[in-house]
Image (tube, rainbow, N blue to C red):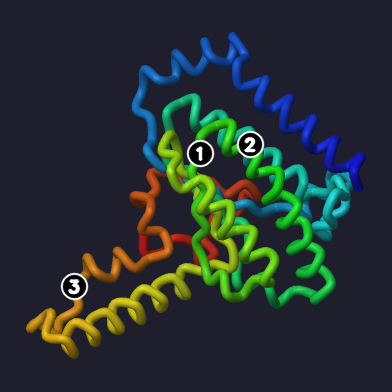
Amino acid sequence: MEKEVMSSLKMAGNILCSASSFIRKCIFGVLRVGPIPNHIAFIMDGNRRYAKKQKLSHDGAAGGGGSYDAGFWALMVMLLYCQELGVKYITAYAFSIDNFKRKPEEVESLMASMLEKFHLLDILVKRLAVRVHFAGNLELLSNELRASAMELAEATAAYSKSVLTICIAYTSRDEILHAVRESCEQKRIDLEFDNDDDDEIKLMKVEKNMYMAVAPDPDIIIRTGGENRLSNFLLWQ
C-alpha cells in the first residue's frame, strides 16, 4: 500500500511539474487571445469502454491502476489546463445517485477508491490554491468518506484562484428537490416569525439553495465517454 501511495504522489509531482512547461505556456498564451469560458463541466463516463480497450480493471479498486485511476489523473490534468487558461470554475460529475444501484461490492470498491483520491486531491489543490466544493446528497456516503469530503472542502474554503466542484451522490432532480424543500422550510420559518409578509417563494431563493449555487451556469459541458445525453446532470443550470 505504501508503495502504491508513493507511486501516486510521484505522479502528482510529475503533473505539477508539467504545469510549468514552456511549450504549453506558449500554446495557452495563444489560446487566451480568444474568448475563455468561465465554467466548464465534465461528465466523467466511459470507464468500462476505456478499461476494455486498455485492458484495465474497471471495478474502482483502490490503487488498482484501473480506468477510474486514469479518469482521476485525466481530471487533474484538465484542472491544470483550465487554471492555466483562466477558466475559474471546473465541475466534474463523479458519481450519480443512480450508481448506488450497481453491485454492492462494486460500489464499496468505488467508495474506497474515492477516499484514496481525496487524500491525493488534498495535496494537489493546496499547491494550486484551488477551492474544492462537493455538490450532492452527501448523507448517502459512508461516514468516513463524508467526513473526508467535508474536511477537504473546509481546508480549501479560503482559496479563490479557481473552484473545483465534485458532484458525488448527485442527480439534478435530487438537487432541484433539495432546493425546493430548503426554500419552503426557510419561507415557513420567515412567516412563523413575521420576518416576511409575502408567502410566495421567489426563483432567486430556489437558486440560492441549489447544490451548485457556488458556481455560475456552465458555458460548456464535455462528456468524456462520447455519449450525447445529460444523464440527470445540471438540468436546471
The numbered disc on residue 130 is 1
Mark positioned earlier in the residue sequence (1 or 3): 1
Q: Quadrant of residue 125?
A: top right
**Vertical arrangement, residue 128 with respect to residue 49, above or below:** above
Q: Residue at the location (64% across, 71% down)?
A: 141
Measure the alpha-carbon separation of dots 2 and 1: 8 Å
Q: Nearer the viewer, residue 59 or 230?
A: 59
The numbered disc on residue 202 is 3
Mark 2–mark 1 contact, CB under 8 Å? yes
Give how far across and how far down residue 28 sits, in percent.
Answer: 49, 18
Q: Residue furthest bottom?
A: 192
Q: Residue at the location (28% across, 83% down)?
A: 184
Give amino acid for label 1: Val
Q: Which residue is mark 2?
A: 124
Q: Secondary structure at mark 1?
A: strand
Q: Nearer the viewer, residue 80 or 222?
A: 80
Q: Secondary structure at mark 3?
A: loop
Measure the alpha-carbon separation of dots 2 and 3: 39 Å
Left or right: where 103 falls relative to 187: right
